């Protein structure tokens, strides 16, 4: 570890960082998030805890340059005294929610009434003054949402759909007909793989609601037990594994007076409900075929339930889902993505409004004819953009980083990761014609003529470790990488063992001009004596459709090849990398990649830590896995090629498998079956089970010790073998 070369302060910071990382919940506590802007642009609502270690979310309002606390669970009588409903627990697990208290909320159209749930109780608060008040509800409340006019609050309780007025007059609009039926909730595949966390949508007139009905009875049943407490009964969950039946999802329009209209479309041909909504032009729904090669946007007749095709997208591999689409402008122009060549364009009314090379990431909102969206013209950055007829295209976030936002009434909230960490601020007058942009960071001054930018306070802890990435463009494919060296290392003074620290799969980038928890962790491993290399290879987002779809049919080969090529290129760039001592670690897809590395390339990789690795792709969910590998009955070779199961006999290097035993995303069976195969083949390995842990372990002590444990395992493995045959 070369600890003698560290200053006392560096040594203390390095030793204490894992505990700080855990208690701050990956530095997420104290960060403003979940923004809503009022129609006049004067007020901004958001959620934030009161310190970098306090996990209890509070509701805040920012107005006239000052923040005001709207709701504090600690001050509400009876709040937090009950158990979180199971449906809410699952919703939080899908969202990887790390806090408690007010974790989400919804408002009426004027952003004057806010509704939220605390331990199953329904609460509301008015933003123009007063204190939060409880609203009588029929049972434990999940996902409460006020009507646009603020007169009612809709919610789900025990899988039934309710609407209540603020006096407690409750109406059950849809009753679950059986234990496998729910109304108003997103099914597993939608919440985990389609970016759809909602199951109902109010009509603008506040008299009707578009509601999803989900029947999980066809879905394969799994059981999750707690081996650490054999007295607990197992928990049954419905999990749609690749090639098996999905939940049956239908849509209904429910009127407050009790009328019901079923939405009609060819559900056999288009079984996935990707998105839905209801705007001034009526209800709409986006549906997708099982093979994911066709996506249709349908207009819904609210009187009859009949549908009409507004738009169809096709792709020979798969149609990528873009968050926030479809949407419609005030004139009714459809806001959609369009893939052509190596660019994902933003289109409005069928016309492309973004140039070649600017990759659409997500649509954040539509106001009038103005569209707010995120896009990337550099894989290392993601920015907030605005398009409006007559004013063209403008980038609102200026400084390096990965930004998102919300906007209304000429005000934009910019939030995201910058080189200084999580930051958020309010940009006034951003809707005005000719606005030049935003400062984009706390304390930064905008150019002359820029609209005023006001920072929202972050109470997050400052990491004890300061990331020092060297950004590299590696190899023929210009792979984006970041190399982290120990702060105490002087170039040319000695060779460093190498640690690859990738995710490497769809939906996530780790390399960028921003400080996130993952960059801090990579630097911490560097301070332990490693040269840490992080690389985003083929299949990762924001480099265009062709880049993303290179992995179609094979999620392993290209991803692993890119890690190998990047390692060699980085070693050519930095002569201090010791290629006779190379380790790799990762979680989820990164864990799968780490295990595959020591299986297939033991001549390059000498030790690995694989956390929550999906070792058998047939056991992963339908929508996510069939997107990349097809149906397992039609293309079994893709699953054979990509799965690690069946190839355990190849292991010849130290491997540590880590898995949460309560993981309902990547089941612990992935690791346990793979371990059994390794044992049967006589292949030594280590397994670290985490009782009670889900896909994202929540226990602070576990999360801290996991970093120490991985470090010690990898150092020991490399030292024992010295990496040489």
Image (cartoon, rainbow, N blue to C red):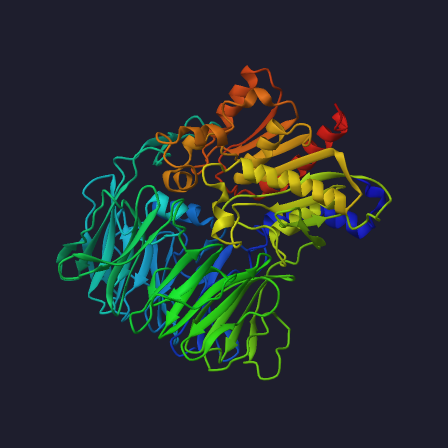
Q: Quadrant of residue 232?
A: top left
Q: Quadrant of residue 28?
A: bottom right
Determine whether 53 is above or below 41 in the image: above
Q: Position of residue 54 (x, y in %)?
A: 55, 56
Q: Position of residue 116 (x, y in %)?
A: 37, 60
Residue positioned most to the front: 341
Determine whether 599 is above or below 43 in the image: above
Q: Residue at x 62, y 33 (%)?
A: 609
Q: Give the camera-side residue of 166 and 221.
A: 221
Q: Residue at x 25, y 39 (%)?
A: 180
The answer to whether residue 324 is visible is no
Residue positioned most to the bottom: 449
Q: Position of residue 139 (x, y in %)?
A: 27, 51
- Would residue 69 be found to the left or right of residue 215 on screen? right
The answer to whether residue 366 is visible is yes
Determine whether 505 is above or below 138 in the image: above
Q: Residue at x 59, y 37 (%)?
A: 560
- Would residue 496 be found to the left or right of residue 107 on screen? right
Q: Position of residue 678 (x, y in %)?
A: 56, 20
Q: Give the camera-side residue of 338 and 179.
A: 338
Q: Give the camera-side residue of 660 and 345.
A: 345
Q: Quadrant of the N terminus?
A: top right
- Would residue 587 be found to the left or right of residue 271 on screen? right
Q: Quadrant of the C terminus?
A: top right
């Amino acid at each position: 570890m070369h600890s003698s070369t560290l200053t006392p302060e560096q040594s203390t910071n390095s030793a204490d960082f894992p505990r700080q990382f855990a208690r701050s919940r990956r530095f997420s506590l104290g960060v403003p998030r979940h923004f809503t802007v009022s129609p006049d642009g004067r007020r901004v609502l958001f959620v934030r805890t009161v310190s970098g270690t306090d996990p209890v979310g509070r509701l805040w309002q920012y107005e006239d340059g000052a923040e005001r606390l709207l709701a504090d669970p600690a001050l509400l009588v009876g709040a937090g005294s009950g158990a979180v409903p199971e449906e809410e627990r699952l919703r939080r697990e899908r969202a990887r929610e790390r806090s408690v208290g007010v974790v989400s909320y919804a408002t009426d159209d004027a952003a004057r009434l806010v509704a939220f749930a605390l331990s199953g109780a329904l609460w509301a608060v008015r933003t123009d003054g007063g204190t939060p008040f409880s609203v009588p509800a029929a049972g434990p409340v999940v996902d409460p949402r006020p009507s646009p006019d603020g007169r009612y609050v809709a919610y789900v309780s025990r899988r039934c759909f309710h609407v209540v007025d603020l006096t407690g007059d409750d109406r059950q609009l849809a009753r679950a007909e059986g234990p496998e039926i729910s109304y108003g909730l997103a099914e597993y595949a939608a919440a985990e793989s389609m970016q759809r966390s909602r199951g109902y949508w109010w009509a603008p007139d506040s008299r009707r609601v578009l509601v999803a009905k989900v029947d999980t009875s066809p879905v394969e049943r799994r059981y999750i037990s707690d081996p650490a407490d054999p007295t607990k009964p197992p928990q049954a969950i419905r999990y749609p594994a690749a090639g098996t039946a999905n939940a049956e999802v239908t849509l209904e329009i429910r009127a407050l007076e009790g009328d019901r209209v079923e939405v009609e479309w060819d559900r056999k041909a288009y079984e996935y409900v990707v998105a839905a909504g209801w705007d001034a032009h009526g209800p709409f729904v986006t549906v997708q075929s099982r093979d994911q090669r066709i996506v249709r946007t349908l207009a819904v007749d609210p009187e009859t339930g009949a549908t009409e095709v507004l738009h169809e997208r096709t792709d020979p591999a798969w149609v990528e889902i873009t968050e926030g689409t479809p949407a419609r402008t005030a004139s009714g122009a459809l806001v959609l993505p369009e893939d052509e060549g190596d660019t994902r364009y933003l289109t409005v009314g069928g016309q492309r409004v973004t140039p070649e090379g600017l990759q659409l990431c997500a649509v954040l909102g539509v106001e009038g004819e103005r569209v707010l969206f995120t896009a990337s013209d550099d894989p290392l950055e993601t920015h907030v953009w605005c398009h409006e007829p007559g004013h063209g295209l403008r980038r609102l976030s200026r400084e390096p980083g990965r930004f998102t936002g919300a906007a209304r009434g000429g005000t934009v909230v910019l939030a995201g990761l910058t080189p200084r960490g999580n930051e958020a601020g309010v940009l006034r007058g951003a809707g005005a014609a000719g606005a030049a942009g935003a400062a984009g960071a706390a304390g930064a001054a905008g150019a002359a003529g820029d609209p005023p930018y006001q920072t929202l306070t972050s109470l997050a802890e400052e990491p004890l470790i300061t990331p020092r990435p060297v950004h590299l463009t590696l190899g023929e494919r210009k792979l984006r990488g970041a190399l982290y060296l120990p702060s105490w290392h002087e170039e040319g003074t000695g060779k460093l063992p190498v640690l690859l620290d990738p995710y490497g799969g769809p939906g996530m980038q780790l390399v960028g001009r921003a400080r996130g928890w993952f960059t801090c962790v990579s630097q911490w491993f560097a301070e332990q004596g490693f040269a840490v290399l992080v690389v985003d290879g083929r299949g990762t987002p924001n480099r265009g459709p062709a880049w993303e779809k290179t992995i179609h049919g094979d999620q392993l080969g290209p991803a692993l090849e890119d890690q190998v090529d990047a390692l060699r290129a980085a070693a050519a760039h930095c002569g201090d990398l010791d290629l006779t001592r190379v380790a790799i670690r990762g979680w989820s897809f990164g864990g799968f990649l780490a295990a595959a590395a020591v299986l297939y390339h033991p001549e390059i990789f000498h030790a690995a830590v694989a956390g929550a690795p999906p070792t058998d792709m047939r056991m992963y969910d339908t929508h996510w896995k069939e997107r990349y590998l097809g149906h397992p009955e039609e293309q079994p070779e893709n699953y054979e090629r990509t799965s690690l199961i069946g190839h355990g006999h190849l292991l010849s290097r130290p491997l540590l498998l880590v898995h949460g035993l309560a993981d309902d995303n990547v089941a612990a069976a992935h690791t346990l079956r793979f371990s059994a195969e390794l044992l049967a083949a006589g292949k030594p390995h280590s397994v670290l089970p985490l009782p009670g842990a889900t896909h994202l372990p929540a226990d602070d002590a576990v999360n801290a010790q996991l970093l120490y444990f991985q470090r010690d395992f990898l150092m020991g493995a490399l030292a024992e073998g010295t990496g040489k045959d």
